Image: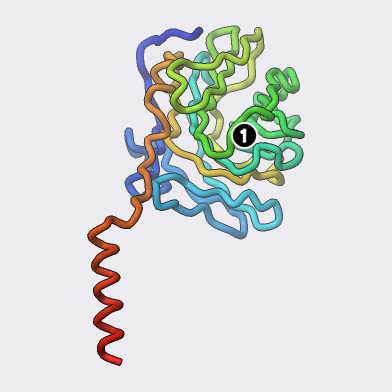
């Protein structure tokens, strides 16, 4: 399992401040809405809502720092369905298609959650059959020198679920593209939260323990319900 090197958080998109685009750790790498026909929106719990409509696309993106000897990309995702078709992009580091040099993407393909790269094809693929639609999941990809590591962990698990480690160079941090694939034509319907990108190797257990960092949408309080009942009584009396 990856251990922490000198921390170098270069981008944090938590969305919970009501701003979908700002980077919480500085002015660089501010996101922009993609050039599609729809917009990513904000949910009441402080997460970002991606419609995932290939015919009415919406995504978020920014240009990244470029090549990176090491990196950690961590994002929290929740969706009603993990099987949405082929090559549906959750995160991509580039545009221009699968043949683009040093490109990689995290996607959902035929019910499998994958990491697909220009150099080695699908270097990771794990079934989503056991994933819950009601849970948040942390997805973390780490480039650690010559090794690449992949983790997929349900919120509350306590420690990271290691999918695998391979000797492969997926590419770097050329771009941060949330909710779309490299070919700009396949999108994933989901909520996303607490996205962190480091140009260093980080401890995945710490990222998992943070959780999605979203707020629960409060139910009406008993006081509010009593107030509404009283208002209804007054209105009936006035008839």
- Residue at 50%, 34% in the rendered image: 136
The percent coordinates of residue 116 (x first, y second) are 70, 25
Residue 177 in view here: yes
In front: 169, or 151? 151
Colour scheme of the rendered structure: rainbow
In front: 66, or 227? 227
Q: How many circles with numbers are drawn on the protein? A: 1
The answer to which image quadrant residue 37 occupies is bottom right
In front: 180, or 220? 220
Horizontal side, residue 89 vs residue 160: left or right = right
Q: Residue furthest bottom?
A: 239
Residue 116 in view here: no
Picture quarter with the C terminus: bottom left
- Residue at 43%, 18% in the rendered image: 158
The residue where tag 1 is placed is 94
Disc 1 element = loop
Instruction: Rate crowding at label 1 as few (under 14), some (14 to 19) or many (20 or more) other CA atoms within 10 Å.
Output: many
- Residue at 27%, 57% in the rendered image: 222
The percent coordinates of residue 135 (x first, y second) are 51, 35
Horizontal side, residue 235 vs residue 124: left or right = left
Q: Is residue 169 above or below residue 225?
A: above
Q: Is residue 122 above or below residue 235?
A: above
Horizontal side, residue 228 vs residue 37: left or right = left
Q: Is residue 227 above or below residue 231?
A: above
The percent coordinates of residue 202 (x first, y second) are 43, 15
- Residue at 65%, 37% in the rendered image: 82
The percent coordinates of residue 60 (x first, y second) are 52, 45
């Amino acid at each position: 399992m990856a251990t922490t090197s000198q921390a170098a958080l270069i981008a944090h998109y938590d969305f919970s401040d009501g701003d979908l685009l700002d980077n919480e750790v500085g002015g660089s790498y501010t996101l922009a809405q993609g050039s599609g026909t729809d917009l990513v929106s904000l949910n009441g719990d402080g997460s970002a809502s991606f419609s995932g409509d290939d015919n009415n696309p919406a995504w978020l993106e920014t240009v990244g720092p470029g090549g990176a000897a090491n990196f950690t990309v961590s994002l929290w995702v929740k969706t009603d369905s993990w099987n949405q078709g082929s090559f549906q992009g959750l995160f991509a580091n580039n545009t221009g298609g699968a043949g683009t040099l040093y490109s990689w993407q995290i996607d959902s393909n035929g019910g499998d959650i994958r990491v697909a790269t220009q150099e080695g094809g699908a270097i990771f693929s794990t079934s989503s059959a056991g994933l819950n639609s009601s849970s948040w999941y942390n997805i973390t990809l780490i480039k650690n020198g010559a090794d690449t590591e992949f983790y997929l962990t349900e919120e509350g698990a306590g420690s990271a679920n290691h999918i695998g480690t391979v000797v492969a160079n997926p590419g770097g941090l050329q771009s941060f593209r949330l909710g779309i694939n490299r070919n700009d034509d396949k999108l994933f319907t989901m909520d996303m939260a607490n996205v962190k990108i480091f140009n260093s190797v980080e401890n995945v257990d710490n990222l998992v323990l943070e959780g999605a960092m979203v707020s629960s949408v409060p139910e009406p309080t008993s006081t509010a319900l009593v107030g509404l009942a009283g208002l209804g009584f007054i209105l009936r009396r006035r008839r």
